[in-house]
Image (cartoon, helix red, strand yellow):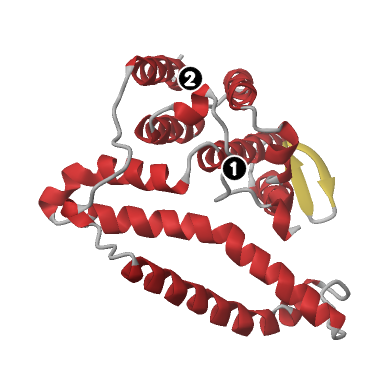
Amino acid sequence: MLKDITIGQYFPGNTLIHKLDPRIKIIIISLFIFSLFFIKSFIPYIFILGFILMVVKISKVPLKFILKGIRPLLFIILITFFINIFMTRGEVLFELGPLTVTKEGLRLGFFMGIRLIFLITGTSLLTLTTSPIALTDGIEKLLTPLKRIGLPAHELAMMMTIALRFIPTLLEETDKIMKAQMARGADFESGNILNRAKNLVPLLVPLFINAFRRADELATAMEARCYRGGDNRTRLNELKLDKKDIGALVSMVVFFGIIVSTRFI
């Protein structure tokens, strides 16, 4: 289950999506997330689904790989779905003991479930089609204007990228520790939710030790390579916008602008 989480992983490729400027991809995914919260009917979600499928097709990222990243979060999606169904007041459709299912709650539950699935898919596509170095450069360039007010753009971008990159690494470490403890008789599957949560507590100590060890090794490696960052840092590949980047940005601004406008029509 832990290996199914795809956020933070990079799927190498030489497609149009992979070649897009990381700044453009970050802006597009921001517009994508922004537009999702403005949708109030099901029809715009059909166009959003078409957009996602088009990106998956062009990027040549296997659809099964995308869907695999949703599986670990199905529990959270279902909880969100049922909370909205039972906690939203409105026209009562039927009752389940002390709980009532309303028409408005059912509609809002579907909306929230679809929204979460699209959010997970969209953010996964960003990391799957953008290398960590390119993502760092893109975030830093976008945050550069904020340096005037004292924001450490480079350091902030580096921390965000390292955090994303360490997600699959820490998940792999967790899986190894769980298997090692299961080989010694530990049980992580039986019992109720509270018992399972208590059984996971012994995982935290070795996981934190490994995380700090990896962080120390990374810091040592960066210092050994005389890495300093900041204004004097040079790059092998400088970010430059070309016609395909501008074309993609303009078309996506128009597309998501239409999606947002459906809320007011």
Q: Nearer the viewer, residue 206 or 231?
A: 231
Residue 162 appears left or right of 147: right
Is residue 102 depicted above or below 262 in this figure?
below
Is residue 151 depicted above or below 219 in this figure?
above
Circle 1: element type: helix
Q: Nearer the viewer, residue 228 or 103?
A: 228
Circle 2: element type: helix
> What number is the disc on residue 141?
none
Spatial separation of the CA atoms under disc 1 and disc 2: 19 Å
Give the mark nearest the N terminus, 1 or 2: 1
Q: Callout 2: few (<14), some (14-19), or many (20+) C-alpha neighbours within 10 Å?
A: many
Residue farthest to the front, as pictured: 225
Residue farthest to the left, as pictured: 148
Q: Callout 1: few (<14), some (14-19), or many (20+) C-alpha neighbours within 10 Å?
A: some
Number of numbered callouts drawn: 2
Task: Name the amino acid, label 1.
Answer: Ile
Q: Mark 1 — residue?
A: 120
Q: Nearer the viewer, mark 1 or mark 2?
A: 1
> What number is the disc on residue 259?
2
Residue at 48 percent of width and 39 percent of height: 130
Residue 207, image x and y in percent? 61, 77
Residue at 51 percent of width and 26 percent of height: 17
Residue at 79 percent of width and 56 percent of height: 98
Is residue 58 depicted above or below 117 in this figure?
above
Residue 141 appears left or right of 190: left
Residue 119 appears left or right of 77: left
